[in-house]
Image (cartoon, rainbow, N blue to C red):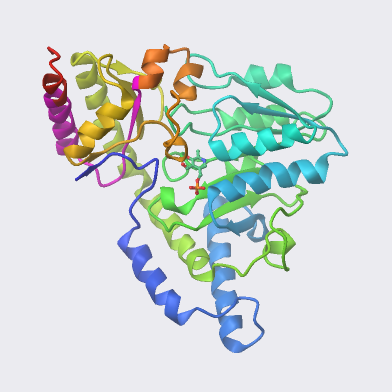
Amino acid sequence: MIYFDHASTTSPHPEVVRVYTKLLNASFANADSLHAPGRKVKQQMERSREKIAQMLHVKNDEIFFTSCASESNSLAIVGFALANQNRGKHILTSNVEHSSTKHAFDFLESVGFEIERLPIHEDGTIWPEDIQTHLKENTILVSIMHVNNEIGSINDIERFASIVHEHPFCQIHSDCVQSFGKIDVPFEKLDMATISAHKIHGLKGSALLVKKENVRLKPIVFGGQQEQGLRGGTENAPANIALAKTIRLALEEQEEAYYTAKEINSFLRKEVEFLGGHILSPANALPYILNISFDAITSEVLQNALDQKGICVSGKSTCDSKSKAESEVVLALGKSHKEAKHAIRLSFGKDNTMQEAKEFIQAIEEILKNYGLSI
Ligand code: PLP
């Protein structure tokens, strides 16, 4: 199998699996129980929080464990809007956010918030001056993703943060799911940031929200005192403890993995164009994500043909994979409807090799020939 679908999910690191499996038995107690096993689990979880905070250069009580990035995004957006609506109801975002962010904003709009979705430019990003010109007196939040999950474009969120912080009370959230562990994320500059374990060779059901001390949120999952009262429910302590290891390993392997992805990406860009395909990802996108299309084959047909050859890729965001609609992100880039309907996303991980990239190209050549297309 050739797995080029790491933006959907990654295989858990063997070291993470080892630690987690051990914890499932040894640390099953409820972290809020007052007895000795409960206190021990609490201590392990708080130690994990402390290590994560150090690696992300934030404070311990600015790390909030959640079950997935979709939950983190929902808490950051809906929880923030509910807690800060007395200051204003205008929020800025982009028109290519992940469905978890997009739907959180659709919900806020339905209850009276003014959501402005800035359009991306041809390079797939929002420009800092767009933020500058659209900030209003009553803007309370800017929430824009760091790296786009379909095309890999990289937003300059550090510049966004400095512009947002010139505003008297506006704050900034960024969905850093596709950037964290791949490029540096400026957590120090952001008021809130989302990351997910399963995108960096960690566990599913494990994610976090970085929320700075000066950010007010209301909970959206009601319950007890867990996570400073912002997220009810018995904490998934084994996963939360294993997250520190996941993050450490991802950061240790970041540089080497980046160069592997870059090498594969550059090779595939040339070869795909040579075969008459289109490169839809912008030139300076994150090398881990490469969106391409071929005129003669729709996304669905190409995905199936590749699947039959044991090659895993995606059409668009996996969370939207059941929808037959063309990719909204590719359309937002200014590409044609055909390109949006034919787009496939390749996403690479630390264990991919150049040999796999060569085999992928060979597979594409065969598929094009099978469809009677001359190369
Ligand atoms: N944000 C982005 C940019 C993503 O790519 C994804 C997953 O595809 C998510 C959020 C949601 O992550 P999770 O599966 O942890 O909810």
Q: Residue farthest to the right?
A: 86
Image point (56%, 85%), residue name: 37
Let me know if residue 22 is in the magenta part: no
Q: Position of residue 283 (x, y in %)?
A: 38, 19
Q: Position of residue 3 (x, y in %)?
A: 26, 43
Q: Examine the rendering and report whether any part of residue 191 can be seen.
A: no
**Which quadrant does the N terminus fall into?**
top left
169 or 371: which is nearer to us? 371
Image point (40%, 22%), residue name: 284
- Residue 360 lies left or right of residue 182; in this view the side is left
274 or 185: which is nearer to us? 274
Q: Position of residue 39 (x, y in %)?
A: 61, 82
**Which quadrant does the C terminus fall into?**
top left
Q: Position of residue 341 (x, y in %)?
A: 38, 20
Q: Examine the rendering and report whether any part of residue 142 can be seen.
A: yes
Image point (23%, 38%), residue name: 307
- Residue 315 lies left or right of residue 192; in this view the side is left
Start and end of the magenta stretch? 342-366
Residue 260 against residue 167 in the figure, above or below: below
Residue 113 against residue 191 in the figure, above or below: above
Q: Quadrant of residue 236?
A: bottom right
Residue 340 against residue 74 in the figure, above or below: above
